[in-house]
Amino acid sequence: MKVWISALLLTVLSACASTPVDLATAPYVSVDRVHATNLLEKGAGKVPVIISYDHFQDIGTMSFTFYVDWEPVAYMREGEQLRIFLTPGRHILSAVAGKRKDSPFATTLVDHFTSDGEYHYRISPDGPQLIPM
């Protein structure tokens, strides 16, 4: 009985796992769902940041609104990616299920960005999580 319950639990949990997107083939978020189009523009000294939204093996789909410093940037769908450019320094990144800031299904992290590299974060609905890569 314990073996059967353990096997069932493992099957259920693995069925809810997310899979990272392949950035080489993942579509970009449509511009009509980008609220902060100014962040799409490269600029001198700006830091490239890639946000990708994992594929999720679950019933139905979930969309996330991605925020920088509490301002909405883009409404992302499963399997998409977004490339933005931030000024160096400290920024607050958030991913919130749906379009409401007060969603209980949200994740936030604070990071310090320097102009010497490219940053990549995954939105994973497992939790949810915003995972630095």
Image (cartoon, rainbow, N blue to C red):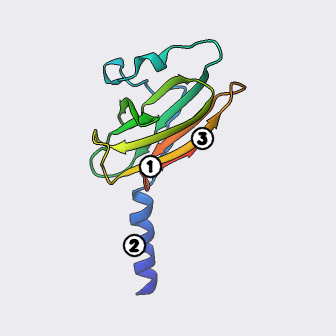
Question: What residue is shown at x 30% (from left), y 48% (from top)?
Answer: 102
Q: Secondary structure at mark 3?
A: strand
Q: Residues within 10 Å of mark 2 (few under 14, many from 20)?
A: few
Q: Is residue 71 above or below residue 39?
A: below
- Quadrant holding the C terminus: top right
> Please, which residue is most extreme toward the right here?
116
Question: What residue is shown at x 63% (from left), y 37% (from top)?
Answer: 112
Question: What residue is shown at x 51% (from left), y 39% (from top)?
Answer: 92
Confirm or deny contact between disc 3 and disc 1 (CB under 8 A). no
Disc ID at residue 107? 1
- Single out the mark in the foreground, 2 or 3: 3
Q: Residues within 10 Å of mark 1 (few under 14, many from 20)?
A: many
- Single out the mark in the foreground, 2 or 1: 1
Q: Nearer the viewer, residue 96 or 24?
A: 96
Residue linked to disc 2: 8
Mark 2 or mark 1: whose residue is earlier in sequence = 2
User: Disc 3 versus disc 1: distance between alpha carbons?
Assistant: 13 Å
Amino acid tagged 3 = Asp
Question: What residue is shown at x 32% (from left), y 24% (from top)?
Answer: 33
On screen, residue 56 versus residue 122, left or right, reads left
On screen, residue 100 versus residue 17, left or right, reads left
